[in-house]
Amino acid sequence: MPLARRLNLADAIAIGLGSMIGAGVFAVWAPALGAAGSGILIALAIAALVAFANATSSAQLAAVHPVAGGTYAYARAEIGPWSGFIAGWCFVIGKIASSAAMAMTFAAYAAPEEWRVPVAVLAVAALVTVNCFGITRTALLTRILVVITLLGLAVVTAAGATAAAPGATPDALPDATLYGILQGAGLLFFAFAGYARIATMGEEVTDPARTIPRAIVFALSGAVVVYVVIGITVVSTLGADAIGSVHPLADVVAAAGWAGAEPIVRVAAATASLGALLALLTGIGRTTLAMAREHDLPRFLAHVAPRWHVPRRAEIAIGIAVIGIVLVADLRGAIGFSSFGVLLYYLIANAAAFRQHGAARRYPRFLQVIGALGCLVLVSTLPVLASLAGTAVVLLGIGYRILRLRVTRR
């Protein structure tokens, strides 16, 4: 059964913004500043450039292949089944880890330390339930979460503006190095990489050939503006003090003397985490559905609920996997593992878009080259342990497909 086309342009943009303006904007500045130092804005520009190149590839592909699954479906059509499988598998494993990271971040802001694991598990279970009752409910909830998040960020920006004028000049950031800037860009890219969630829902968007490319570009542009404003606010208010902060945006408000507004920022951070988690779970479910339809994942997961028109079995299976990671992993490990899978996913997306020609081409090929090279450079900055774990799981997926193909031939 096909999915129902119920999302308009505003819905798609909201889901994209909910994915990108998530927990990353509240948490990424300390590690990114620690890596990039005074080159933080250059790192942000590099991350935005790579994200834009990847987004145009996704938009170009989505206009021609308006189906569920994102790059899994695109790479199958443009390159071949194996490329599609690797892209889809990297997306699923990377975003499951990212979902766990978002759940952990939500719990860190919303609950005392001893309650964080059960609260994270409860958040995942609640949002999976929301997803099981229709995509329009998901889009509505995402809009509400995005508005709350933006209000919290507006408070941070206003507080930073009042602190900059009368306050003392903060300590200068450490000098930048090339490797540090690239590592900072890799961390910041993790915060940007939510626009593909729009493409994975190509089967549920009205007029997808027109809506999806526009939604991807609009959502990414909005996220870039937000990150630039918040980045400047953090640097100008806290300077080097932001490097050691576990909640830099709350520290901005405190430094400005707006202590009463700290709860607002914490609520916004928790809300942003929920918005990103909701959008992540939605996107993974659609890619899992597409892979199950092609037998690249168990066919059992290809079922679409007849009443609500959602891949309920896939949503529940993903929720169980995310909860499993929450119970056994930490936040740093989840983020590193997620980045490995996501960057490989976008590498294949750029390769697929590069192969398109004729009327299918919307953007020049040099953007796909920039996107692919950017993915390779940024993945090389990841921690060795995360890269080894990611490689092992990718090989596990490849082994599963080889075994399945042999069984099918017999």
Image (cartoon, rainbow, N blue to C red):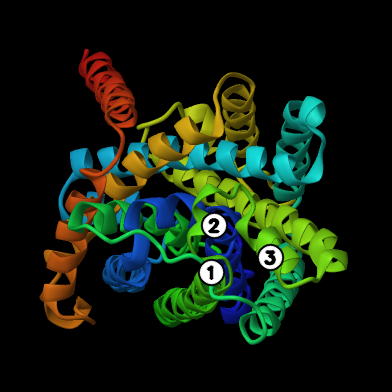
Q: Residue shown at 44%/82% (left/top)? A: 214
Decide: is 7 above or below 82: below
Name, please, the residue furthest toward the right. 260
Q: Give the residue type that dot 2 points to.
A: Asp
Of the numbered discs 2 and 1, the one sitting upstream in the chain is 1
Name the spot of residue 292 as percent of width and height, x first: 44, 36
Circle 3 packing at 10 Å, graded few (<14), some (14-19), many (20+), is many
Q: Secondary structure at mark 2?
A: helix
Name the spot of residue 225 as percent of width and height, x first: 49, 80
Report how far apart the C-alphas of labels 3 and 1 lie in the structure. 41 Å
Q: Give the residue type that dot 3 points to.
A: Ala
Q: Are marks 3 and 2 in contact (CB under 8 Å)?
A: no
Mark identifier at residue 139: 3
Report how far apart the C-alphas of labels 3 and 2 lie in the structure. 38 Å
Circle 2 packing at 10 Å, graded few (<14), some (14-19), many (20+), is some
Q: Give the residue type that dot 1 points to.
A: Pro
